[in-house]
Image (spheres, rainbow, N blue to C red):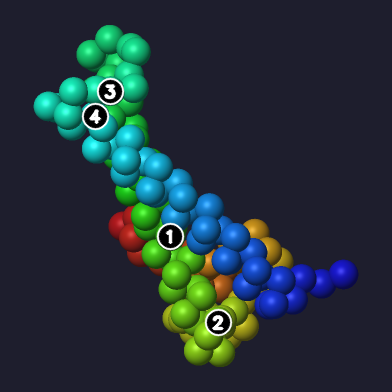
Amino acid sequence: MVTTKDELYSELIALRDGLQAQVIEMESADEMDEPGTGYTNHQADDATAVFDQTANRSALQAARDRLRQVHDALARYEAGTYGICENCGREIDIARLEAIPYTPFCLRCAEQRDYIAGM
Ligand SMILES: [Zn+2]
């Protein structure tokens, strides 16, 4: 039983749809919190509300980033380069794609990038 790229493609589509719904939901929740709109779904006190908003914003940002990565992966699939490391051009291990279907890098390059980014 090996996961095929077709299966990973379906997974990416499902991921994209889920993330899109999540982003839309978080964006509308964010808009409702704008002062002056007259209603809010926060029942907590102000301090908690501020914390929630900050947490929502970073969750929204993370979901948007993830969505962009999924979009990029789908574009690579259509271009026929899905599963090929953008950095070194080698095939990305299928086990890695199963874990992170939208990753543009093989494990080695991802580790190297993390290392460089952390310096
Ligand atoms: Zn690589």
The image position of residue 64, as x and y in percent, is 37, 55
Q: Which circle's residue, 1 or 3, is located before the other in the chain? A: 3
Q: Residues within 10 Å of mark 2 (few under 14, many from 20)?
A: some
Q: CA distance from mark 2 to mark 1?
A: 15 Å
Tell me which label, 2 or 1, sits earlier in the chain. 1
The residue tagged 2 is: 77
Pointers 4 and 3 in contact (C-beta within 8 Å): yes
Is 92 above or below relative to 68?
below
Split into 4 quadrants, where in the image is the C terminus?
A: bottom left
Give residue 29's position: percent from left, percent from top. Answer: 33, 35
**Three-letter amino acid code of the residue under disc 4:** Asp
Q: Is residue 43 above or below residue 57?
A: above
Is the C-beta of the residue carrying label 4 under 8 Å from the nearest atom of ligand 1?
A: no
Q: Is residue 91 left or right of residue 1?
A: left
Q: Which mark is residue 40?
A: 3
In front of the other: label 2 or label 4? 4
From the viewer's side, name the closer residue of 118 and 28: 28
The residue mark sitting in front, 1 or 4, is 4
Q: Earlier in the sequence, mark 1 or mark 4?
A: 4
Inspect the image, locate mark 1, and give the three-letter code of the amino acid beneath it.
Leu
Give the image location of residue 79, x and y in percent. Answer: 50, 89
Mark 2 Cβ inside 8 Å of ligand 1: no
The local secondary structure at tag 3 comes to loop
- As rendered, which of 68 and 89 lies closer to the eye? 68
Disc 4: which residue: 33
The residue that mark 1 highlights is: 67
